[in-house]
């Protein structure tokens, strides 16, 4: 199965999300056009790829608003990527020199990530200067050298981003890495639209993972109580990924997401007495696989982008586990 296609298209079961402020899933989503907006429970949602996503009004189009958005997205990029990327800070020349002189391929990848981080910092520094000039009444056009230099830094950082991994080490998350550049090159409204689309694809990724976990575990007597817990966690994860941190509802959504994730991680399979040692080993392996699935849902929801490579590897892991469970 093509994981990226499954994640980006509406071929998964629609999430009812009934436990907290959410869209009405009773509507036949097959007839709804992407970009449709509607109000459910006094909250506005927008529809993409089979999912109703919480809608937020874009910031007013201005350089100051764009700077605020880019600053936020740059911090978010550092937060979700591997440690050490921001170590160079603003020492761009030193980071570039280290990258150019590095000959060890494995270390060069890390140097590339550090250079990308320094380029992001240089770009945001340049954009800050542009905004400060505008606030003083100096208009800076797109053809201005400051603006072109800023764009070049973002573009080079984006190219180097192919060498940057998620903090889990699982895979790169190019969509997160490319967000500051996208915010720089498009209108704020267009960026928000791309975010809504990406959140919908993320929700589909969460649904695919939840479905895989339930298919792998929930027909087994040892995991008979697991299905409703997975449904609850998937719903909480989708609420988390669609909600902006500035939204006051985050004080309910984030604790719910963390608490349900802890419940999944602490789930204890019901092993009856008299089973063989091999059976016990297999169930312990199953529990580790369940925790790995919980972790992947957590990473996907918090990054707000699909992780197709990690999802494919997890599905393969579950398939192997299913064969082992069947032999017990």
Image (cartoon, rainbow, N blue to C red):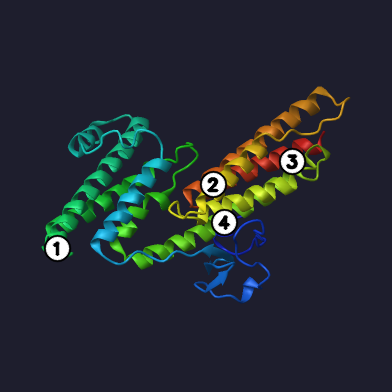
Question: Residue 189 is drawn in which quadrant?
Answer: bottom left
Question: What residue did someone put label 1 on?
Answer: 140
Q: Is disc 4 in contact with disc 1, using a CB cutoff of under 8 Å?
A: no
Give the farthest residue toward the right: 274
Q: Earlier in the sequence, mark 3 or mark 1?
A: 1
Question: What residue did someone put label 2 on?
Answer: 254
Q: For mark 3, does the 10 Å Cα neighbourhood hold few (<14), some (14 to 19), or many (20 or more) residues?
A: some
Judging depth in this view, the residue of 23 and 196 nearest the camera is 23
Question: What residue did someone put label 3 on?
Answer: 322
Q: Is disc 3 in contact with disc 4, using a CB cutoff of under 8 Å?
A: no
- SS label for mark 3: helix
Left or right, 28 with reference to 175: right
323 is higher (above) or lower (below) than 214: above
Question: What residue did someone put label 4 on?
Answer: 203
- SS label for mark 4: helix
Real-space Cα distance between discs 2 and 1? 40 Å
Q: Nearer the viewer, mark 4 or mark 2?
A: 2
Real-space Cα distance between discs 4 and 1? 39 Å
Real-space Cα distance between discs 3 and 1? 60 Å
Judging depth in this view, the residue of 192 and 208 nearest the camera is 192
Q: Earlier in the sequence, mark 2 or mark 1?
A: 1
Q: Nearer the viewer, mark 2 or mark 3?
A: 2
- SS label for mark 1: loop
* Residue 190 screen position, x and y as percent: 37, 67
* Residue 106 screen position, x and y as percent: 37, 31
207 is higher (above) or lower (below) than 52: above
Q: For mark 1, does the 10 Å Cα neighbourhood hold few (<14), some (14 to 19), or many (20 or more) residues?
A: some
Instruction: Tell me if I can see residue 233 in this picture.
Output: yes
The quadrant of the image that shows the N terminus is bottom right
Judging depth in this view, the residue of 163 and 185 nearest the camera is 185
Left or right, 147 with reference to 52: left
Q: Is disc 3 in contact with disc 1, using a CB cutoff of under 8 Å?
A: no
């Amino acid at each position: 199965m093509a994981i990226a296609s499954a994640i980006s298209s509406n071929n998964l079961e629609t999430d009812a999300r009934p436990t907290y402020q959410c869209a009405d899933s009773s509507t036949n989503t097959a007839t709804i056009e992407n970009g449709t907006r509607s109000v459910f429970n006094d909250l506005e949602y927008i529809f993409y790829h089979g999912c109703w996503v919480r809608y937020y009004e874009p910031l007013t189009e201005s350089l100051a608003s764009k700077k605020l958005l880019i600053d936020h997205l740059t911090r978010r990029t550092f937060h979700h990527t591997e440690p050490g990327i921001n170590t160079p800070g603003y020492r761009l020349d030193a980071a570039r020199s280290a990258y150019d002189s590095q000959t060890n391929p494995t270390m060069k990848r890390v140097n590339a990530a550090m250079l990308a981080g320094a380029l992001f910092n240089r770009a945001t520094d340049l954009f800050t200067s542009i905004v400060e000039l505008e606030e003083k009444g100096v208009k800076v056009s797109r053809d201005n050298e400051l603006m072109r230099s800023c764009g070049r830094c973002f573009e080079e950082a984006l190219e180097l981003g192919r060498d940057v991994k998620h903090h889990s080490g699982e895979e790169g998350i190019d969509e997160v890495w490319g967000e500051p550049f996208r915010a720089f090159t498009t209108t704020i409204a267009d960026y928000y639209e791309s975010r809504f689309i990406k959140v919908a694809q993320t929700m589909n990724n969460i649904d695919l993972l939840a479905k895989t976990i339930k298919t792998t575990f929930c027909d087994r007597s040892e995991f008979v109580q697991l299905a409703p817990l997975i449904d609850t966690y998937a719903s909480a994860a989708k609420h988390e990924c669609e909600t902006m941190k500035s939204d006051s509802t985050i004080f309910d959504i984030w604790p719910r997401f963390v608490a349900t994730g802890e419940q999944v991680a602490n789930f204890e399979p019901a092993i009856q007495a008299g089973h063989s040692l091999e059976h016990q080993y297999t169930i312990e392996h199953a529990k580790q696989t369940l925790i790995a699935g919980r972790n992947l849902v957590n990473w996907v929801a918090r990054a707000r982008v699909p992780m197709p490579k990690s999802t494919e590897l997890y599905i393969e892991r579950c398939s192997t586990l299913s064969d082992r469970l069947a032999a017990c």
